[in-house]
Amino acid sequence: MEVRRSVWPSIKGYKFNKLLLKNAVIVFLLVTLPLLLVIAINYNKFDTVVKDRIMDMNEELLQKNAAVTDSVMENFLDTLNKLSQLEEVMTVVRAQEFDNTYYSNVARAKQSVEAKTIYDESVISFCIYSDLNEMLIGRHGVAHISQSMDKGKWYDIHKQEPMFYSYVLLNHGNSMFICQPIWSGVGQRAGLLVLEIELQELRSSLESQEISQQGLFFVLDANGQIAYCSDKQFETWDEAVRVEYQSDITTAMSGQTQLFADHGRRVVSVTPSAYKSWQYAYTTQMLDYQREQSVVRGFLISSLAVGILSSLIVAYLITLVTYRPIKKIVNVIENPGLHWDEREATKQSNEMLYITSNILAEEGVGDEVSEELEVRIRALRHSQFRALQFQIDPHFLYNTLETIKWSAVEEMGLNNKTSKMLTKVARLYRSGLENDDVIVTLREELDFLKLYIEIVRMRFGDAIQFRWNIDETLYDCNMIKMCLQPIVENAIQHGLRPRKYQGDIIISAYHEKDCLYISVENDGQVISRGDLKKLNDKLKTGAGFEENKVGLRNVNERIKLIYGKKYGVSVSNVGPDQVSEDAAVRTRVVLSFPCRNFNRSEETK
């Protein structure tokens, strides 16, 4: 408890709140925001899939109902066809003289038609019209079409565009006309036979055939007007609602199936009947679509909330863990004599304590210890220790990535690029955080680097080629953990990005005398000689770097802080000819370490 209490005054003294906010913004931009962007992109794809599924389902229901209705309508058409072929009907249609014989034939034709329709409760009335003599036989008798009381709206349509096949026409709210052309013996259109059908009887016939009631089914006449609706209350609907349905159906006629998503309305499908003379429409409310869309929106909102909360927690832990070791170093500076007996015990797998133990062991207690510690603390405050940032609980980041990955699997299926990349990133975090060792073998560092390269290949494919030139006898040499990945990342971002992320990266390791050298080369954009000199000067002095340039500086300062100023990072341009700057074809970054075989008990414990 005393240690914990002593940490808080130091944290507040180092502007803890300001650093917490800065770390929270960085974590959110680097981790949470990219994941949310991936989720948002896949949400658009998911939304499209849901819409397609709803339209396909609506189309299937329409086709099913259309087939049932066609079978019902076929009975009426069979009746019409048989009536149109009666000899009595053909005789009055072809008649040219209107004598007693004609009127006798008219009586026989009416009697024959009535005899075949009298037991059909759905038939309200019938008409026989002759195109040849323009006489109309109806319920009020026979008369010229211009004087007949039985002339309906079907005549106006037939006169404008004569029908050559059966068609349906809405009469009024309670009935509709089914019209059948009558043909002469030589294939000439002679007239028209019209049956007026009661819509209520049609409804009963369709309901007995199990018309799907999940949505609304419509029969449209030859003019595209709604002649029938499966909702029994359709005629009592508000006029504005009926107009809205009519408008949607008319709009969908040109596109077969359309989804009217504005104001959360409906999906509409339209198809012609098998007889081509009328059409069917089917509409379903978009409740299922809205429900699934709400689930996805809720997932996005919760992901955003969790992302922000996670960023704050991670930033808090990073800030807290970063400053606790600083308190230990401050105590060494203020009271070095109290910690002299701990110079062996403090060689733990913690970079801060490892630094203090080296200073105490090599410099002794006194003014030199204080001066050296102050110099290193000052350098430590200006370098961004990525390793310290990864000392938070490894299970937190790993489990968070796993949770997001499985959410992606549930939404998009197992075999999707998002979950695969999240698996790679989780493995990368797991590898970097599964132990707290500061010093690792070259083999372990290369294994970690290969995980990062797998992620790079998932993005760029074979555009970036990696080549290895590693002496296997060096695999057990020690080095600082997580130094190669930032260098390779720099090579991609600063070297190969100007070349549209195409080129080669060569990773080599060799030793000379007592030094282990690891180099990373790329054949991308080379650095000018003047900029190269400035960069190497900054690496030697540790000063002059921009605040946001943490790649090379971070690695360089960590090496110097742990192994001393003799070691670190250098940058050069290499090529077949070093005489002129233009001959350089590659940029090489070299990391140097003491060439020692790895000993966990000596280096990290």
Image (spheres, rainbow, N blue to C red):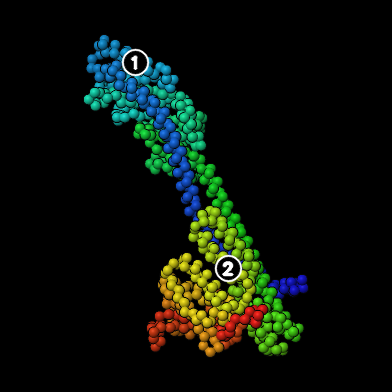
Q: Amino acid at mark 2?
A: Tyr
Where is residue 238 drawn, in percent x and y?
A: 51, 33
Identified at 35% across, 14% down, the residue is 111
Can residue 495 be seen in the rendering of this structure?
no
Where is residue 154 drawn, in percent x and y?
A: 35, 26
Question: If you read the primary sequence from the N terminus, does the residue marked by circle 1 or circle 2 appear first?
Answer: 1
Residue 157 found in image quarter: top left
In this view, the residue in front, 374 or 447, is 447
Where is residue 205 drawn, in percent x and y?
A: 46, 26
266 w.r.t. 581: above or below: above
- Residue lying at the far front of the rendered structure: 473
Residue 95 found in image quarter: top left
Identified at 45% across, 74% down, the residue is 466
In this view, the residue in front, 514 or 101, is 514
Identified at 27% across, 25% down, the residue is 183
Tag 1 and tag 2, C-beta contact below 8 Å: no
Where is residue 327 drawn, in percent x and y?
A: 70, 77
As drawn, is 469 to the left or to the right of 294? left
Q: Amino acid at mark 1?
A: Ser
As drawn, is 419 to the left or to the right of 154? right
Q: Tag on residue 304?
A: none
Q: CA distance from mark 1 to mark 2?
A: 90 Å
Residue 558 found in image quarter: bottom right
In this view, the residue in front, 474 or 434, is 474
Q: Which residue is mark 2?
A: 429
Quadrant of the image containing the N terminus: bottom right
Q: Tag on residue 112?
A: 1
52 w.r.t. 592: above or below: above
Identified at 43% across, 25% down, the residue is 175
169 w.r.t. 448: above or below: above
